[in-house]
Structures are given as C-alpha cells and as structure tokens.
Image (cartoon, rainbow, N blue to C red):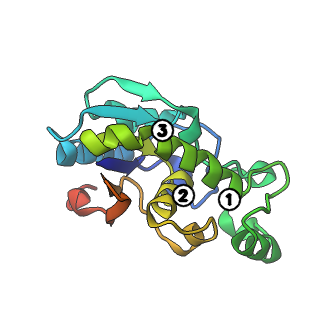
Amino acid sequence: MLILLRHGQTPANAGGLLLGRADPPLTELGCRQAAAAAMALAGDVHRVVSSPLRRAQQTAEALGLPVDIDEEWIEVDYGEYEGLPYRDVPAELWQQWRTEPGFAPPGGESMAAVGARVRAACAALQEEAAERNVVVVSHVSPIKAAVAWSLGVGDDVPWRMFLDVAAICRVGIGPNGPTLRSYNDTAHLAGVS
C-alpha cells in the first residue's frame, strides 16, 4: 500500500498563504496533528519517504522510523506568488493555471511538471508498495498528483480536489496497477486542537 500523508499545519497554512518551497516549521497544532497521524498508522508502516521540506520531515519523524528524503515529493513552486494570500493572486492567473496544466506562474512550476515528477516517484515506489506499506509524507499538490496517477487521470484533475492538513490517502497496488482506497481521511484528527 502507498500511504500518502500531508504534513501538519504551518503558520502559512493557518494564515491562508500560498506555501510552496518556503520552509516554515509546523505549528504546535501541526505537531499534534503529526502525532495523531502517527498513532493512526502505528504498526502499519514499513518505510517512510518524505519531501525535503521541514514541515514534511517533522511530520514524517513523528512516525518513529528512519526517513528517506526524496526531492520528487517537494511542493509545487508558486514562484512570485509564494507566501502571498490566495486573494492576492489575480483571478485570470488562477483561471489559466486551473485550465492549462502546462501553465506556470512567473518563476514557478506548472501542474504538468508536478504531475510528471510525482508519476515518476510513484512508479519508483510501486513495486515496493505492492508488497509492504510505504508512507510518503508530502504536500497538497504532490499528493493530489499521486492520486491523479492512481486514477489514471490528467494533471488538471488535482484542482478539483480538496486535501486537508495531516490527511491520509491510501493507494493499493495490485496486479492491475494502482487503486485509490481512501482520500482525505482525517478521522484521526477528531479531538485534536
């Protein structure tokens, strides 16, 4: 099973800011969310892979196993819009980004580029995940891209998904390829505040 875990809350997430390659730590709540996710996955994890960004690594470390860093799981690059409130991004830019997978914001990365690197990362883990549980701790855009990979759909689909902080997604790997088993599971966060 390929288990995809989004990192816990950061100050930027809590403030409604675009958070791509910036590297803030988790908030106290984010640390509690990471601990709750680790409890939910306890005894079910054989390998942990993480984005190189601190918020993902902190979440991965809560699982209590060695963490392998993989650059392919890093968050999308928002370019000039990094750190800005969502409302400060021009509506026409959002529209173009949502409808043209090859479009990248100035200095940033396209969803097609995210999709390509994440599909390669998923393919690299596929054989191992068919035999044992591999947890990947990453970010909203790469996890959505991995879900799109599992469904065999294009790079425009992730815009139609919502993924909460510290949410868990599960992708089964069988003889016929990947199958989405669960998406945006946050039951383990009940009572975490």
Extreme residue toward the left, this view: 43
From this view, report whether residue 39 is shown above or below residue 13: above
Q: Amino acid at mark 3?
A: Ala
Question: Which residue type does callout 1 highlight?
Answer: Met
Disc 2 residue crowd, few under 14, some 14–19, many 20+, Cα 10 Å: many
Please give the residue where the numbered disc 3 appears in the rendered image.
124
**Quarter in which the C terminus is drawn:** bottom left
Kindly state the secondary structure of the residue where label 1 is placed.
Answer: helix
The spot of residue 136 in percent (x, y) is 40, 42
Question: Which badge, 3 or 2, comes first in the chain's sequence?
Answer: 3
Q: Few, some or many C-alpha atoms within 10 Å of disc 3 (few <14, some 14-19, many ≥20)?
A: few
Q: Residue reaching furthest top?
A: 66
Return the mark for residue 142. Answer: none
How far apart in space, not on screen, are marks 3 and 2 (Cα)? 15 Å
**Residue 146 visible:** yes
Q: CA distance from mark 1 to mark 2?
A: 8 Å
Question: Quarter-wise, where is residue 105 in the image?
Answer: bottom right
Left or right of residue 128: residue 26:
right
Seen in the image, is 93 located left or right of residue 141? right
In percent of width and height, residue 177 lies at: 38, 56
Q: How many marks?
A: 3
Against 162, is 81 above or below? above
x, y percent for residue 94: 74, 71
- Give residue 111's mark: 1
Q: Earlier in the sequence, mark 1 or mark 2?
A: 1
Give the residue pinned by disc 2.
Answer: 145
Q: Is residue 90 left or right of residue 178?
A: right
